[in-house]
Image: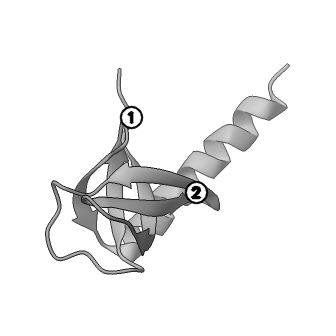
Amino acid sequence: MCLAIPAEVIEFLADDMAIVSIDGVRKEVSVALVEDLAVGDYVILHVGHALAKIDPAEAQETLDLLRQLGEYAEAQP
């Protein structure tokens, strides 16, 4: 199973690459598949490639749910 996660675009690089932030973790990714991106936009990220732009509220909700899942998993014996 694969999982795509929200990431915020924080800087553009050469050759259709960008730096994104995934809940504070920075990663260099390809943005070649998504048009009209700006710094501050959120994208769905899968295996180092931005697939689509998404609504910031939706991105935050998904990140919050992922954080809760992580907290739940850590609390399990």
State the image quarter where residue 43 is shown.
bottom left
Vertical comparison of 48 with 65: above or below: above
Q: Mark 1 points at which residue?
A: 3
- From the viewer's perspective, is residue 60 above or below residue 30? below
Number of residues whose C-alpha sits closer than 10 Å to that of mark 2, classed few (under 14), some (14–19) or many (20 or more) = some
**Element at label 2:** strand
Q: Do the residues labelled 1 and 2 touch (CB within 8 Å)?
A: no
Residue 55 percent coordinates (x, y): 31, 73
Viewer-closest of 4 and 26 = 26
Q: Which mark is residue 26?
A: 2
Dot 1: few (<14), some (14–19), or many (≥20) neighbours within 10 Å? few
Identify residue type, mark 1. Leu
Amino acid type at image mark 2: Arg
**Residue at image point 80% right, 25% down:** 76
Where residue 42 sits in the image (x, y, percent)? 37, 68
Q: Quadrant location of the N terminus?
A: top left
Sequence-first tag of 1 and 2:
1
**Residue at left offset 35%, top offset 75%:** 41
Numbered disc total: 2
Q: Which colour scheme is used?
A: one colour
Q: In this view, does 12 lie above or below 52?
A: below
